[in-house]
Amino acid sequence: MSDSKAVRGSRDSSTEKRTSIPTFYRQVIAELRKVVWPTQQQLITYFVVVMAFVIFMMALVAGLDLAFGKLIFAVFAGNSGQ
């Protein structure tokens, strides 16, 4: 088993002090400073790739929906001339 501090102890322990709101925000800002933000060119590239993929998937689903719809109508409609 793991000897991690995260596993040890009970959740009912009220001896742990909560972090104050200003300290929390300072820690959040400190973590956000560590983030490697994409450049504008990378952001544009990612946007174009995601949009192309979404449009492709929409076209694929629409095509399958149309094909299956026509197939279902052909199977269940039959020849109404009989």
Image (spheres, rainbow, N blue to C red):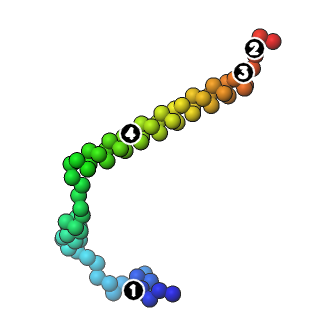
Dividing the picture into quadrants, the one containing residue 45 is top left
For residue 64, above or below residue 17: above
x, y percentage for residue 8? 43, 87
Dividing the picture into quadrants, the one containing residue 71 is top right
Q: Is residue 25 visible?
A: no
For the residue pair 60 and 2, the one nearer the viewer reads as 60
For residue 81, above or below residue 37: above
Q: Give the Cα distance between marks 4 and 3.
A: 37 Å
Q: Mark 4 or mark 2: name the one nearer the start of the chain.
A: 4
Say what amino acid the circle numbered 3 marks: Ala
Q: Tell me if mark 3 has few (under 14), some (14-19) or many (20+) residues whose alpha carbon lies within 10 angstroms of its own.
A: few
Q: Nearer the viewer's eye, disc 1 or disc 3?
A: 3
For the residue pair 4 and 25, the one nearer the viewer reads as 4
Kindly check if marks 2 and 3 are in contact, taking CB atoms under 8 A apart as contact: yes
x, y percentage for residue 70? 63, 25
Instruction: Quickly name the residue at label 4.
Output: 52
Q: Tell me if mark 1 has few (under 14), some (14-19) or many (20+) residues whose alpha carbon lies within 10 angstroms of its own.
A: few
Q: Residue 80 carries which label?
A: 2
Kindly check if marks 1 and 2 are in contact, taking CB atoms under 8 A apart as contact: no
Kindly check if marks 4 and 3 are in contact, taking CB atoms under 8 A apart as contact: no
Q: Give the Cα distance between marks 4 and 2.
A: 43 Å
Q: Nearer the viewer's eye, disc 4 or disc 2?
A: 4
Instruction: Quickly name the residue at label 3.
Output: 77
Say what amino acid the circle numbered 4 marks: Ala
x, y percentage for residue 57? 47, 39
For the residue pair 44 and 71, the one nearer the viewer reads as 44
Q: Nearer the viewer's eye, disc 4 or disc 3?
A: 4
Q: Give the Cα distance between marks 2 and 3.
A: 7 Å
Q: Mark 1 or mark 2: name the one nearer the start of the chain.
A: 1
